[in-house]
Amino acid sequence: MSRRLLLLVFLVLALPALALAAATDPTKQINSVDQRKAASIVLLRPGAIVPGWKKVAVIPNSAPDPGCPGYSPDQSDLVLTGEAANNFEGGVTKVGLESNVFKTRSDALASWTRAVKPALASCLARLFKQAIEQVGGKAAIARSGQIAFPKIAPRTAAYRVSMTVSSTAAGKTTTVPFTAHVVVLGNGRGDATLVTFGLENGIASADLRAFAKLVAGRLAAAKL
């Protein structure tokens, strides 16, 4: 498989807050206490990472969340007081983690209610497709939707997007199937999002659950 194709695909992990994509972002009033709590949720130390995985650099991206037709939750009346991100890779599979801490529990619940709904799956598919095409590839969505997942946090939801990604170089087109998984977790004033992307069926189910359980545990430990 070409290095170019892999780079095209993994650039989607730079998209901000995919699982809670909003037409209008919350107001940011970041404070040091909640910022440390947000960082603690995604800061998985070497000994705590799922075996076979390693931490990699987070790609900065300040682009606003674009929303989608029929799905554009407005969060402009909510207040965000902490946020953090971390990325991991296991071979050619990637995991991006993001955490948010809201000023109040009611803000966190409002964000969840507005964003975590069935239309989120089709919006995820659209955003992944746009991300690939913006960097020169082509993507065709095979299917997208919510999937069953253990309730490991008071608020838990999971989604899957399956697609084929193509890249043409020197007159030769390479097409490869990829699968993205998104798990969204919420507890008190906080939420966390895991975005995974990998070949064929994507991340192994055991690894996805292991990462999600680690993050859910840190979310609970933050006592938000």
Image: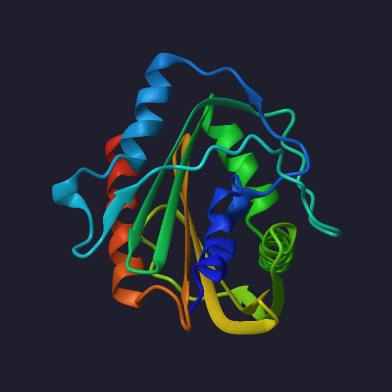
Q: Position of residue 17 (x, y in %)?
A: 59, 46
The count of marks equals: 0
Residue at 44% in and 42% down: 58
Left or right placement of residue 41 versus residue 147 in this view:
left
Q: Position of residue 166 (x, y in %)?
A: 65, 78
Asked which quadrant contains residue 126, the reply is bottom right
Which one is in front, 135 or 214?
Answer: 135
Which one is in front, 106 or 79?
Answer: 79
Asked which quadrant contains residue 187, the reply is top left
Q: Residue 7, relative to residue 57: is it above or below?
A: below
Left or right placement of residue 207 versus residue 8 in this view:
left
Residue at 39% in and 54% down: 153
Q: Position of residue 94 (x, y in %)?
A: 42, 61
Point out the image quarter for the C terminus: top left
Q: Residue 36, relative to residue 68: is it above or below?
A: above
Asked which quadrant contains residue 80, the reply is top right
Q: Residue 185, relative to residue 35: is it above or below?
A: below
